[in-house]
Image (cartoon, rainbow, N blue to C red):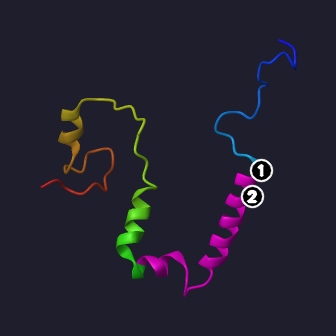
Amino acid sequence: MAVGDGTPGPGRPKGSQNKLQRTVKAAFGEAFENLQSDPECNLETWGRANPKEFYQLASKLIPTEIDATVRGSLFDVLAGLGSGTGSKANDPPVA
């Protein structure tokens, strides 16, 4: 296919940001960093004053999908919990 034959060109790859998006995102990032150094208006101060809104926003940052591979059986995993012989010695005991 030749350029100008009516077919669209490759364009920007799917999901990539244009210059305006990159610029706005960078400006917000810089403003956020500047605000964090001010203890009167940083995110932690706001979160303490507005815990409901803070946790609503924080929950949106948690991944909704996890891609994981589980090896072994569920019985083996459960049997190791609370015995101190599991994969992590600091696991709390299961009541």
Q: Residue furthest top?
A: 1
What is the span of residues highlighted in magenta in the rendered image? 19-47
In the image, is residue 68 part of the stretch drawn in magenta?
A: no
Residue that appears at 19% across and 51% down: 82
Query: Residue beneath label 1, please?
Result: 19
Q: Quadrant of the C terminus?
A: bottom left
Q: What's the amino acid at mark 2?
A: Thr
Residue 27: % across, % down: 71, 65
From the viewer's perspective, tell me whether residue 35 is left or right of residue 88.
right
Mark 1 to mark 2 CA distance (whole Å): 6 Å
Q: What secondary structure characterizes most of the magenta part?
A: helix
Q: Secondary structure at mark 2?
A: helix
Q: Is residue 5 above or below residue 95?
A: above
Task: Using the rendered view, name the quadrant where residue 28 is placed.
Answer: bottom right
Query: Residue beneath label 2, please?
Result: 23
Q: What's the amino acid at mark 1?
A: Lys
Residue 88: % across, % down: 33, 49
Residue that appears at 41% across and 40% down: 66
Name the one closer to the observer, 15 or 36: 15
In the image, is residue 42 part of the stretch drawn in magenta?
A: yes
Residue that appears at 27% across and 45% down: 86
Residue 46: % across, % down: 47, 79
The reply to whether callout 1 and callout 2 are in contact (CB within 8 Å) is yes
Residue that appears at 31% across and 52% down: 89
Task: Using the rendered view, name the quadrant where residue 57 is placed.
Answer: bottom left
Q: Quadrant of the N terminus?
A: top right
Which numbered tag is attached to residue 40? none
Question: Dot 2 surroundings within 10 Å: few (below 14), some, or many (20 or more)?
Answer: few
